[in-house]
Image: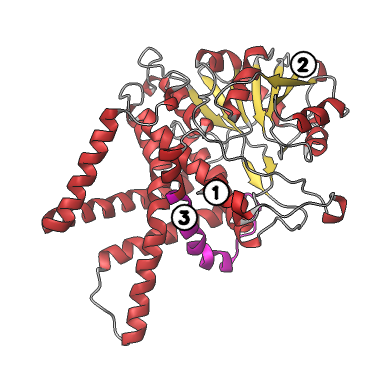
Amino acid sequence: MHGSFPKASQVSLSANEAQITATPRQLMIAFVLVSCAVASALFWPPGGEAMLVLLQVAFLVIIAWRLLTVVVSQRPAPAPPSSPAVWPRYSVVVALYDEAAILPYLIERLSRLDYPEALLDGYLVLETHDQATIAAAQAINRPDWLQVLVAPPGVPTTKPRALNHALAVARGEFLTVYDAEDDPDPLQLKEAAARFAAEADDMVCLQAPLRIRRLHKGYEDSPFLDRHFAAEYAALFEITLPAMARLGMPFPLGGTSNHFRVSALRALGGWDAWNVTEDADLGFRIWRRGWRLGVLSRPTYETPPGRLLHWLPQRTRWLKGYMQTLLVHTRFASGMGWRGWSALFLTLGAALASAALHALSVAWVGTFFLMALLALQLPETPWMGLAILLSGSAAAVLTTAIGARRANTPFNAWDMLTAPAYWSLLSLAFAHAFIRLISEPHRWDKTAHKPDVAPQDLPPAREPDLAESGRAAA
């Protein structure tokens, strides 16, 4: 298996490639492709038909891929490795901004990590202008191994820049990243340390599954978005990523609960501070160096973003970052191999294409059936295209349902029927992401985090600023 991995000497991308959104060459190629596509569709019918066939083939490939991931992810997981003779020092990093309210709950959860305290090396990385969170972090009772680290002023003001500051001073042999709202399994660090000890040195990153749950209802929640968001995560972390790991393919990391060999992470230059999905980018930079990624079994629980005012900016940032990552990694041909290119386009490429086409596809299918209902007969029907769209939807729903069952996440028949409405919202986020990629490529849209506790236990909270939230996503 190792012989099929790219050699470390092939290419090493710098950790600030996303500072340039698109090169002149990429812009020229995009212009030529779009011009040819539009001209063919309008003035050369055979060309338009050929593009339609290619689009249908791409959809069939994605359908086959989804079904393959379901089958491969069902393979029995490897037996848990035995504990190492000596536990290594482990660094735990949490980048925080405007998180004073949730800080006590974060400290409580980090304190539950079951790992020798003398070997823990933790950092709460804060921004110099976030005085409220700095004051709260310095005043709160923290474990002896967890210290406050204030990142120096600078640009860009992003999470990966803060993580790089912690990486420079981290003393652990291994390092993991958590987010403010995370509730990691207490044994997750021990599982990761045991896996690293049992694997060869080219296994440099292990991703824990992220599971979405909300324990208490509050004014910020949205049952529709929360359920679909949780099921979407379940499909990714219970099916897609385990399947890709077992197929020996790279994959985009989650933004939290990824565990690294510190020496490898430093050799890569850390995270790309200019990429707003630094996690997705880092998974493929690891692959280009000839290293491998794997998955863990012990999860981290997170709360969903909640209402549309919070969900939309977060999803906009993700899709904008996927665009950045695709632009970065398509500039360099070396170091990917067929597994790398396949993984890049079957994850980030498929996510972007699907988000762009979801609303149009739903509208097209809805219009077709509405016309048939009104006319009481079927209109002229492109049966192949309709069959592929419906098959793709069925495969997506099947994958989501199986992933949700594995993650013990609710996803019932009503959720299956309303999934197209959720997918259509992804098209709205895609449109925002494309505009933001042009106008503000490096702006980090902060996701608001609220403590997941009973409403009566929370201090009074003001309603979100509608104008500001809309501007952040637009």
Q: Earlier in the sequence, mark 1 or mark 2?
A: 2
Task: Magenta stretch: give its range.
Answer: 403-431
Q: CA distance from mark 3 to mark 2?
A: 46 Å
Secondary structure predominantly adopted by residues drawn in magenta: helix
Dot 2 surroundings within 10 Å: few (below 14), some, or many (20 or more)? some
Residue annotated with mark 3: 428
User: Quadrant of residue 337 in the image?
Assistant: top left
Which dot, 3 or 2, sits closer to the camera?
3
Dot 1 surroundings within 10 Å: few (below 14), some, or many (20 or more)? few
How far across and down, in percent of the image, does residue 239 sit? 52, 45
Residue annotated with mark 2: 119
* Element marked by disc 1: helix
Task: Indicate whether 57 appears above or below 420.
Answer: above
Q: CA distance from mark 1 to mark 2?
A: 44 Å
Q: Earlier in the sequence, mark 1 or mark 3?
A: 3
Tell me the tag on residue 471.
1
User: Quadrant of residue 7 in the image?
Assistant: top left
Pick the front one: 111 or 195: 111
Q: Which image quadrant: the N terminus?
A: top left
